[in-house]
Image: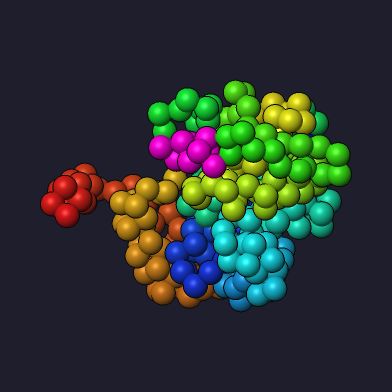
Amino acid sequence: MKSVEHIIVCYGDQLGYHHGAKYQILSAYERWYNRSNSKICVVTDSPKLFKGYPCRVLTLSKEKKSAWSLNGLQHFGIKLQGLKWAMETTDSDASLLLDTDMYWKSDPAPLVEKINEKTIIMYRNEGTIIGSRNQSHNRFEEGLQAKNFRLGSNQQYSLESKSEMWASNILGVLSDQVDLISGAFELFSSLEHHVAAHTVEQFSVSEISRISGIQKLEGKNYLSDWSSTGRKNYVTPILREFFARYGETDFDTHLANWNHIKIRRPFVTLLKQKIRKKLS
């Protein structure tokens, strides 16, 4: 059985992202994260928020955030470079990154065992780029069609008929596949200036893995999330109230009480949100 480090990258002034990271740890800890072959790493600009939590913390400096976001052009570069930093400093066989609005509903161990030199885990396949009906995908075709980009010292990249978009809400790789993530960040740095979409980071991972002959497997069936606007609007204040009540750093108390947090929206709340959206 492979050893695995569960990685979370969270930063910025909105506490909701940090609280989401904590909920992810709490909801998985007693079932899966406290196994002898599992570790946790949080890459964050707010290390004090994770004091007392059973994780190692890599502290993001302003300089790192600026460089990794291409001087503020697109913050998702921080996610890629944060993952790379964790991979470079871990002794675990595999590194498994989740976004802060994701949480496990099934044991991640079977997914970890599928990771190898020729297989990585991403959230889901969202389809090919060229000829897509997806408006966000169209931005890639518009921005990259008939263009070539230097990749490394002796490679060229261009959009192809096989180019696909894979969501990176989850990203599982072998920890020694640092070059794969480095290549994704290099491609991200080149393409970001040409594409009017916020998904260049995950597209870059998808493309670098394709070019490298590495297949991608979907991990979506193992996860639940609150990534939609409506879910975020419901969950964020609930988490804020939880950590206001129990403090930010009392892990044992958090662990004893986290299951009182109700992530799923009641039907009445869902209906009110839908009505409000139609009227706005």
Q: Which residue lies at the image location 73% right of the left edge and 49% below the top edge? A: 186
Task: Tell me which secondary structure the magenta stretch mostly adopts.
Answer: helix
Image location (x, y in percent) of residue 124: 53, 32
State which quadrant residue 180 falls in: top right
Q: Which residue lies at the image location 58% right of the left edge and 66% below the top edge? A: 72
User: Is residue 274 toward the left or the right of residue 38 in the image?
Assistant: left
State which quadrant residue 86 falls in: bottom right
Considering only vertical position in the picture, is 125 above or below 183? above
Q: Give yes or no for residue 103 being in the magenta stretch.
A: no
Image location (x, y in percent) of residue 78: 64, 59
Q: Which residue lies at the image location 77% right of the left edge and 42% below the top edge? A: 151
The range drawn in magenta is: 135-143
- Residue closer to the observer: 175 or 162: 162
Note whether residue 142 is visible.
yes
Image quadrant in which the C terminus is located: bottom left
- Residue closer to the observer: 183 or 243: 183
Image location (x, y in percent) of residue 170: 58, 42
Q: How many numbered callouts?
A: 0
Q: Give yes or no for residue 138 being in the magenta stretch.
A: yes
Considering only vertical position in the picture, is 24 above or below 15? above
